[in-house]
Each structure stands twice: as C-alpha cells, then as structure tokens.
Image: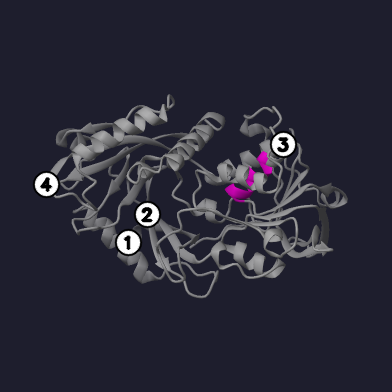
Amino acid sequence: MDAVIDRDLEGAAASSYDLLVIGGGMYGATLALEAARRGLSTLLLERGDFGGETTRSSLRILHGGLRYLQSLDLPRFRESVGERRWFLRHFPDLVEPLPCLMPLHDPPRGGRLRRPGVFRLALRVNDLLARERALPPGRLLSAAETVELCPGVDRAGLRGGALWYDAVAKDPERLVWEVLGWACRCGARALSHVEALELVVQDRKVTGLRAVDRASGRSLDFKARRVVSCAGPWSRDLARRFDRDIPCLLRPALAFNLLLDREAPSRAALAVASREPGSQTWFLLPWEGRLLAGTAYAPVQGGTREEGPAEARIGELLAALNAALPGFDLRRSEVLDILWGRLPAVAEGSVELASRPVIVDHGRHGGPQGLVSVSGVKLTTARAVARRILKVLGAASRSKETPSGFSQRDLAINLAGGGRRGS
C-alpha cells in the first residue's frame, strides 16, 4: 500500500520548506495542494486530527451561487459555482449532487424574495450562468409535487416549491484526507498532532517554526521561508502570538448543527422557515438514515473557549424547526450529536457572519516578512482562497500537471493519538 501520508517527524524536521501551513482543515489542505502543484516544497502541521474541527462540524453542503443572485454579486456566484464543480469532478466518491427543496408559501416566509415568480427567474438565471452539466436544472414544483416530495410540509398557504441542486460532502473529514493525499503525491508533507508554538524570525524575516509533537511532547524545529496560518478559530490567537492582535481575523460567532435520530422528512434537503416575518431559513439534510439540521448561531464572548451551545440555544433551534414544520415534534432526547465550532462574525458579540475571507500579509503591516494569516468563511471556496494566498506570496505560477483522483485504498494515514471532540 502506498503511504501517501506517513507522519515522518524526523524526515520532516530535516528538510527545508518554501511554505509551512498551519491548520489541517479544508483551508489548510487545499493550500497545501495548490502550493505543491506549483512546485513549492510544502509542510502542513495540524494540532489534532485532519479535518476534525470546523470542517467536521459543517453542514456538509457545498453551496453554489444561487444566494448571490439575490444581490447580483456575479463574481462570487461564478466563483462558488466553479469551486463546487471542482469538488464534484475530482472527488466523485465523496461529493455528490444534492437536491434542495424550498417550500413556497403565501404570504412568503422569510422575505418577499420567496415568491414563485421570483424563484422562477432566479432558477433560470442560475442554470444559464452556471452551465453546470453535472447537476440537473432547477425548476418550480406545484403544491401537489411539493407535498409528494415532502409529505410533512406545512400545507397552510402552500403555493408550491423551488427545487435546485447543490452538492454535499458525504464525509468532510475523509474529503480533507483525500485532498491532503493528493497534495502529498505532489510532494507535500502533512503531520497531524503537531502544534505550532513559536515563529522563528531573523532580521524581520520568517526562517522557521518551533512546534511540539502532542503525542510524545517532543519539541521540533522546522525551517521554512513562509508560514501561513489557516488555523480557523485559532488564527487570531496565533497572529497575536507570532506578531500582534488582528481583530479582523476572527470576531467569533458560535455555529452549530444537530444530528437527530429521526428519519428525514424528504429525500431532498429542505430549506424551511416558520410563519414569523423575517424568520431564518433552516436546512434539514438527510444523513445516513438520520437527519442533520442547522445552522444556528449564538454570540461568543471571550475568544475561543472550548464551550459549545447552551441548552437554551439547543432548545431554541428545536423549537424553530418544529415551527417551520408543524407536527414534526422534534425532542431533545432525539439529539445524537451537536456539531459546533467558531466562525468569523462582522463584529464582537454578533451572530451576523462575515461574508468575505480575510488574508493578512503581516510583512506589509510592519510584522515579520513571510507570515500570512487567513480567516475563511465558506467550505466551498477554500481552494479559491488558497489561490489568492499564493498570489499574496508571489507564488501563483502555473501549477504542474498531476493526477487528481486516486482510490481510497491508496490512503494510508498513520495518525498518532486521536479522538474527536464530541458532545
């Protein structure tokens, strides 16, 4: 068996790198892949399990750009569609088309844009601009067709439904591993359970990183000309440790999804809202015979403390889901797992999420040359952000032609330690 991720600590520490990536979620993994494909010697360090934090806790949907048509943000629309297409093409065993159904009521729930006429136009424009051959076109359903696809839908004022297609990552952790496996086939190295401690700088230029092997407690020194922090909720903490506090990297909001011991009410993912004006849209995703629901948000005070949602917040989400699907009657005892993490918000204590990724080149602001910090906002566009980071680093040359897909059998991952955060 070809060990593409081998956790060779001594070999990794003996080499010198063009790029050292901190963080083994989707953002770090795609950066390692894009860098290695461009011929950069690359090392990735992850303090826990690859994909075991924010990526694992996501709702797993790789959204296209349908939402951006509402604001006519065509650049973000095209970027999201292109990145969704990339995942579908290169990882067909882990990413598959996902039908999505939004019941449409009169009066509209969640806003005036949820009228059949508006959605008919949006779906036509989406199909025309996306030109996505891998996904069926969207369409409007009659009320009868909507009830057939989702028998438990609230029929009061039901006008029909909007049906479109996105993509879903069936196992986001395994998807990260496969991206890393591809990166390692291109020459990168990836080490799990190795935590970054201290940036090594000479004459204001990055020369390496001091880290610790969390399995043995041994200190390790790695030589690198550039260091990029893709540490998700810990990106601001690392920026503070390596240089200074940069608030725009992370003003955290708590995000969480619920895995429920309940059969999904539809074979499509549902986008539902209650009758209250301006109510939030909730996604209910069929998941291995059970139901994944979210995403709910709560304010965070005090940085990145390891605290999940309070019981009151979980109860509020269950109540909102029951209000959106009268008669569904979800109960707290049916919650099998709470998948939670931190996402960037627009302000301290806010639950409004940031809409744009943040890339900070510390050297351009008086900090160490060769240090970059990243705060991402969306699973779908992780690779697009990776390409922007390489432009910041001046390493955006044409990537080498390398094989993209490989079998799950080719992934031999030797992880020291382990365990995942549960609830």
Identify the residue shown where x is 71% and y is 42%.
395
Label 1 secondary element = helix
Eye-nearest disc, 3 or 2: 3
Q: Amino acid at mark 2?
A: Gly
Q: Which residue is mark 3?
A: 38
Identify the residue shown where x is 72% and y is 36%.
38
Q: Amino acid at mark 3?
A: Arg
Label 4 secondary element = loop
What's the CA distance linking mark 3 and mark 4?
Answer: 55 Å
Question: Can you give x and y, in whole percent of width and height, for residue 406 in the image?
Answer: 64, 29
Question: Can you give x and y, in whole percent of width and height, for residue 225 in the image?
Answer: 80, 52
Question: Which numbered dot is residue 376?
Answer: none
* Callout 2 touching callout 4 (CB < 8 Å): no
Place residue 120 in its image quadrant.
top left
* Callout 2 touching callout 1 (CB < 8 Å): yes
* Residue 30 as seen in the image, left or right of residue 259: right
Q: Amino acid at mark 1?
A: Leu
Eye-nearest disc, 1 or 3: 3
